[in-house]
Amino acid sequence: MLKHFSAFLVAIFFAASTMAQGGEGEAIAVEDENTAQEEAAQEEENQEQADLALMDSIESANAKTPEKNYLDLPVGFDSEMDSLLNEYYQSVIITPKKRKCVSDSIGEGCSDEVYIARLQKIPAVMELTYNPIVKKHIELYVLKRRKQVENMLGIGEYYFPIFEQALDAAGLPIELKYLPVIESALNPSAFSRAGASGLWQFMYGTGKIYGLDGNSLIDDRRDPIKATNAAVKFLRDLYKIYGDWSLVIAAYNCGPGNVNKAIKRAGGKKDYWAIYPYLPMETRGYVPAFIAATYAMTYYKEHNICPAKMQMPVLCDTIKVKERIHLEQISNVMNIDVKLLRSLNPQYRKDIIPGNGETYTLCLPQRSIGSFMDQKDSIIAYKADSFNVNRAVVLPAQADPYFRGGGGGGGVKGIYVVKKGDSLSSIAKKRKVTVAQIKKWNGLKSDKIRVGQKLKIK
């Protein structure tokens, strides 16, 4: 479209510049303008024909593949993530001996009328529509994934305030805080098969555009605060394009290009449910999953689901660190569980804050900030040689000036020149052989050797 518009502007400019030359120039300009418009129209018609052919092939493929159960699940529902999620939740969950609230093992569904009424009561700017697809996603949460919802509610006590603050500051709908529920199931270390990482599941390239750096030691996409701020900017940019939040979160999942193609194939309709059949498979379940997550996080009590108790402290603070520190150094000196430190600082891939003069953030429970500052030198010095194994300067080993040839053992021949203070025992130790071997190789009857004597070493 931009190319067509540019061609049109060039034609107008050319016409204007030739009007002063008389009727002939004006006629030529008009003819050129008409030609440009005809070419643009033909090109657009060709593109539409190609899109229609592609649309037909998609419809044909869908007709051959029966729908399973309406559920085209986002990453947060991926069965392959279950073990990773369980491992993560177990690292932060507390199981009290006696709990005031215990979830039912089996939940009960509701009628369509109840689901509709409850969705309409949620104070949301975004459209929370209802249909059979949304219903199946809701019941996946409240019936089949009850334990996961229980854990997400618990960990959400820590993450949701971070999301809410950033969204509110940007003037975006607060209910967008549930987007990471379907993106990562609130696991900051989640990594998808496509290469997306973190709570908000940024791809590497998109993360770079929005200021999220990464290397062997750090992945800013896993930093809850940095990634949230980047996601807010990305969502705001998408809303400027579409002006519709359902399309925005669809584009967040599959990219604006795929949404634009779906809009075109749907005859220009800018409505999520109108473009639904033309979206990528996973994205078809994305908006329904978001609506379902919003429902489950709001009405969990009505379905007898109790939030899990997590050890993630609600009150945390960040400090600036310029020194290289391993999280286990902090753990051992300050007696803080290293699993908790990893949960608070998931951006450090190898538990190492690089330091080296650059400034990095360290998140700690608020009550531990003062103690860290007081013990900082002790923490950095604690087993520094063990935790910081990368050597800054290394001098290569020097060859023994009295040894000529190969190594001392392993069948490689060489000549050792005896120097003052040497003994067969000391030479054998240096060359990692035995005294008996040296005597045998050199035909020695006793242990006596002299300075300058040449000994064969094999």
Image (cartoon, rainbow, N blue to C red):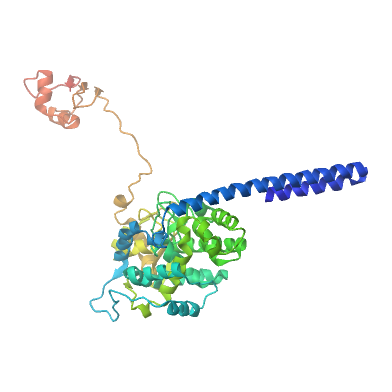
Q: Is residue 441 left or right of residue 129?
A: left
Q: Residue at x 43, y 76 (%)?
A: 112
Q: How many numbered badges does the structure rendering display?
A: 0
Q: Residue at x 74, y 46 (%)?
A: 38
Q: Residue at x 58, y 55 (%)?
A: 265
User: How far from the left and from the top, in percent, is residue 107?
Assistant: 32, 75
Q: Is residue 439 left or right of residue 309?
A: left
In this view of the protein, can residue 13 be seen by the observer?
yes
In this view of the protein, can residue 357 be seen by the observer?
no
Q: Is residue 94 left or right of residue 296?
A: left
User: How far from the left and from the top, in percent, is residue 389?
Assistant: 32, 47
Q: As displayed, is residue 300 above or below residue 59?
A: below
Q: Is residue 263 left or right of residue 102?
A: right
Q: Quadrant of residue 161?
A: bottom left
- In depth, the one of 442 and 104 nearer the eye is 104
Q: As displayed, is residue 2 above or below residue 414?
A: below
Q: Quadrant of residue 272?
A: bottom right
User: How far from the left and from the top, in percent, is residue 402?
Assistant: 24, 24
User: How far from the left and from the top, in percent, is residue 319?
Assistant: 44, 64
Q: Residue furthest right?
A: 22
- In depth, the one of 208 and 407 nearer the eye is 208
- In depth, the one of 391 and 316 nearer the eye is 316
Q: Residue furthest left?
A: 445
Q: Residue furthest bottom?
A: 100
Q: Quadrant of residue 372?
A: bottom left
Identify the image quadrant of the C terminus: top left
